[in-house]
Image (cartoon, grey):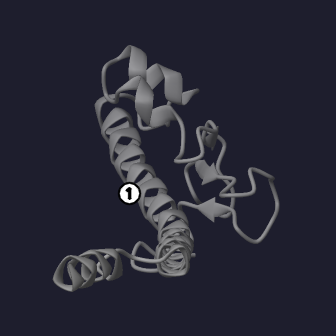
C-alpha cells in the first residue's frame, strides 16, 4: 500500500507547476518581442536599399530611352511603362508611393528622380535623390 502512495506522489511531482509554465510563456513573449524589434529596424533599411536599387534601374532605363530617342528624358515614367522599358510595379517606391520624376532637371542634371522616403513627405531629411544617393549606405 505504501508503495502505491509513493508512486502516485512521484507521478504528481513530474508535472510542471503553473508558475513554471507562466515563466516559460513570459520568456517566450520577451524573446519574440526582442526579435520583432530587431526585425523592424532591418525592414526599414531593407526598404531603403530596395528603393535605391529600383531608382538605379529606373535611371538606366531613362538613359536607354534617351539614347534611343532625341536625347531628352521621357515626359513621365508612365511613358517608360507604355514603351515597355519598365514594369508598372517599378513606378512606386518601397512605401507604395510614386517616385517623383521631373524631366526638367536642375544643376546640369538631365532630370530629377526622387523618393520621399519612409515619412512620405517632400523636403525632409529622409528623401532619396537619385543624384546624391549612395547605394552602399542605408540613408
Residue that appears at 29% across and 31% down:
68
| Residue with the mark numbered 1 | 53
The foreground one among 10 and 16 is 10
Query: Residue 19, located in which quarter of the rendered image?
Result: bottom right
Residue that appears at 57% across and 75% down:
139
Mark 1 residue crowding within 10 angstroms, few (<14) / some (14–19) / many (20+)? some
| Rendered location of residue 8, percent (x, y) | 27, 75
| Rendered location of residue 32, percent (x, y) | 49, 70
The foreground one among 127 and 1 is 1
Which residue is farthest left? Answer: 3
Identify whether 125 is placed above or below 76.
below
Residue that appears at 36% across and 28% down:
69
The total of numbered circles placed on residues is: 1
* Left or right: 74, with 4 as reference point: right
* Left or right: 113, with 52 as reference point: right
- Split into 4 quadrants, where in the image is the N terminus? bottom left
The foreground one among 2 and 20 is 2
| Rendered location of residue 137, percent (x, y) | 47, 80
Residue that appears at 34% across and 40% down:
61
| Mark 1 secondary-structure assignment | helix
Query: Residue 123, located in which quarter of the rendered image?
Result: bottom right
Identify whether 67 is placed above or below 109.
above
* Left or right: 13, with 105 as reference point: left
Identify whether 53 is placed above or below 66.
below
Identify whether 46 is placed above or below 86.
below
Amino acid at each position: 500500500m505504501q508503495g502505491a502512495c509513493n508512486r502516485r506522489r512521484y507521478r504528481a511531482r513530474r508535472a510542471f507547476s503553473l508558475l513554471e509554465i507562466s515563466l516559460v510563456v513570459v520568456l517566450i513573449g520577451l524573446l519574440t518581442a526582442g526579435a520583432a524589434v530587431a526585425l523592424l529596424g532591418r525592414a526599414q533599411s531593407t526598404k531603403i536599399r530596395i528603393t535605391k536599387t529600383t531608382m538605379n534601374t529606373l535611371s538606366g532605363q531613362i538613359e536607354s530611352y534617351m539614347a534611343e530617342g532625341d536625347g531628352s528624358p521621357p515626359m513621365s515614367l508612365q511613358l517608360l511603362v507604355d514603351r515597355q522599358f519598365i514594369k508598372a510595379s517599378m513606378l512606386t517606391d518601397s512605401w507604395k508611393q510614386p517616385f517623383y520624376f521631373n524631366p526638367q532637371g536642375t544643376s546640369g542634371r538631365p532630370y530629377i528622380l526622387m523618393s520621399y522616403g519612409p515619412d512620405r513627405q517632400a523636403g525632409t531629411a529622409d528623401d532619396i535623390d537619385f543624384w546624391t544617393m549612395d547605394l552602399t549606405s542605408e540613408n
